[in-house]
Amino acid sequence: MGETPDFNNAPGVDIWCGKAYRESNSSFDPGGRFEEPAVSSFPLLNFRVRPRMSIYLDNESNGSLLIDAGISYQVGQPLTSRNYSDPALNPTLLKVDVIYDGGIVKTTSVFVGTTNNEVALDLECFPGSLGAYNISIEATLGRDAVYTASAELFRLPYPEHYGSISRVDNLYGGLWVQRGDEAWSHIFPYTYYVQWTLYWNSNITTLDDFAALGYNVIHIVPTGSLGDKPFPWDEFEPYLQRADELGLYFQYDVIWQPQNSTEMVEQVEHLRSHPSMLLWYQSDEPDGKSNPLNSTGLAYEKIRELDPYHPISLALNCHDFYYSNYAAGGDIVLTDTYPIAINATFSTVYNTECNLTYGCCGCDNCDGVFEDISTRIDEFHRRDGILGWSKTQWYAPQAFGNETFWARYPTAAEEAVMTFLAINHGAKGIVMWNYPTTPELLEATNRMAVVLTSATAGGFFLEAPLFQGLEVQGGSRIDAAIWVNKENKKALLSVVNLNYKDLSDEIRVVLPDGVLVESIDNTLWGDSTWDVDGAIVTGTDGLGGLQVSLLVLSTEP
């Protein structure tokens, strides 16, 4: 494991997110802030390549690469005015060679200023292997400006003994899964964290009851006997079998301990081929706990070595504490920002102030508003872009209260706002903390489960480009996003009112350039009244407080 790194706290000073939080301790700089690259005075070409899918199998002949030629002022290689012009005025075309093993295997062209250019790739020249293939791209702009980038491509041997395989789509961020001989299908996970001792261990029929409510994934928090050593497989095996029979998937918590990986290795080896395995969950809030900085990375490498056929996830709690170190341990990063019913500036638990260098108020560097959620997800996405990562972001909404920092449970309306706001900002999975919850919240999340796990919603969330931050006229604090499927001439519009008060004025949502709407086909969520007129969708009667609308639209060719 290596030595535990020293943080900025003195011996005996408890910290959370690197900050002292007890009255008996003083404030100090926690460190660990994200290191921003210098801002360039001239544009840079952020030239990148990555495979469309995180893994391919040797029974697949066709794959693809995603090539970015974006313009940045923080990341990339210099662009000079003599080599390119403003993309909006006169797009510059880049000829790109795809290179493997010293030879050109593909030549294509992309415009400067574009991202996510998908290029088909013949996989037959990459024999099935557990090792990675290094793919590089090269482009020349003008006479002497040469740009290069590289990525790893995995074409794994098909695992005959596996019951399920899953992978991340690096274009839209979603999970795809193949169970047995079935075809690949996308899945939008929607579920709760559920502690073993608070629900599951009472009876195996709890799985039937939970599945009947509409949730498609289970996350068993290993409390009670599931923390025993050795692991009680005889007690747990019937649950694995029943989950398979019900078609449920596991986000499986491997009880990763930085000081000892024995139990984690045993569980991965035991469960990796199970038909219900969807992904691993290796660490819960390691940044808040100030686990060794290399711990999540080491866990990731070990799990990947044991099982390259399922992605790895973790949850981060801190706003800005060694993000690049801790997030390195996950293909999927959950943020558990809990802003409801907190005092964001004074800790009612520890009787201290909360600020950038001191205190713990239950939501790190938060303001106690819904925007804490979208700001956190957007910031993690932004950092991923700077680091050159293709990570997927999930969100863990607050479904608890009446404890420590949280004076009450969220209402059903607040739960919907938190969930759809996160999805508007790119969350590709939702795992609420925790179950059991209040009857009011359960009724609301049961209804959301029907919508969010449906083929209709998943087809947009996981197979269509997202345009977020749409212009909204007629009110403030309204978050709107749209997923557009040009091929099917359909779109999904999500509008979330973050205000607790009703908005009586007409609300106008301005759609992205080139998106014109003919009609509203269906309302998946909400009861507001909407009209469409080309590039404008209008809430004719305003919006109720905390109202959410999810509309399926038909678009013009």
Image (tube, rainbow, N blue to C red):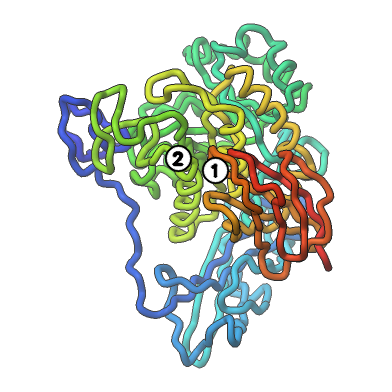
- Residue 73 location, x and y as percent? 41, 72
Amino acid type, label 2: Val
Residue 369 got which mark?
2
Tell which of 334 and 185 is nearer to you: 334
Task: Judge from the rendering whether residue 147 lies leftward or rightward of residue 123; answer left or right.
Answer: left
Q: Is residue 380 visible?
A: yes
- Residue 141 location, x and y as percent? 53, 86
Residue occupying image coordinates x 56% and y 69%: 136
Q: Are marks 1 and 2 in contact (CB under 8 Å)?
A: yes
- Residue 152 location, x and y as percent? 56, 58
Residue 498 got which mark?
1
Graded by Cα atoms within 10 Å as few (under 14), some (14 to 19) or many (20 or more), the crowding at tag 2 reads some
Residue 93 vertical position relative to residue 185 in the rendered view, above or below: below
Q: Is residue 58 visible?
A: no
Residue 22 got which mark?
none
Farthest-out residue, front: 504
Residue occupying image coordinates x 35% and y 70%: 39
Find numbered disc 2 in the image and state the secondary structure of the residue it sits on.
loop
Task: Judge from the rendering whether residue 256 lies leftward or rightward of residue 28; answer left or right.
Answer: right
Residue 96 vertical position relative to residue 221 in the rendered view, above or below: below
Find numbered disc 1 in the image and state the secondary structure of the residue it sits on.
loop
- Residue 58 location, x and y as percent? 73, 51
Residue occupying image coordinates x 81% and y 43%: 183
Residue 112 vertical position relative to residue 271 in the rendered view, above or below: below
Amino acid type, label 1: Leu
User: Disc 1 or 2, which lies upstream in sequence?
Assistant: 2
Tell me where residue 48 sits by quadrant: bottom right
Whole-number angstrom distance, CA of label 1 to CA of label 2:
9 Å
Tell me the quadrant of the picture where the N terminus can be found.
Answer: top left
Residue occupying image coordinates x 48% and y 25%: 255
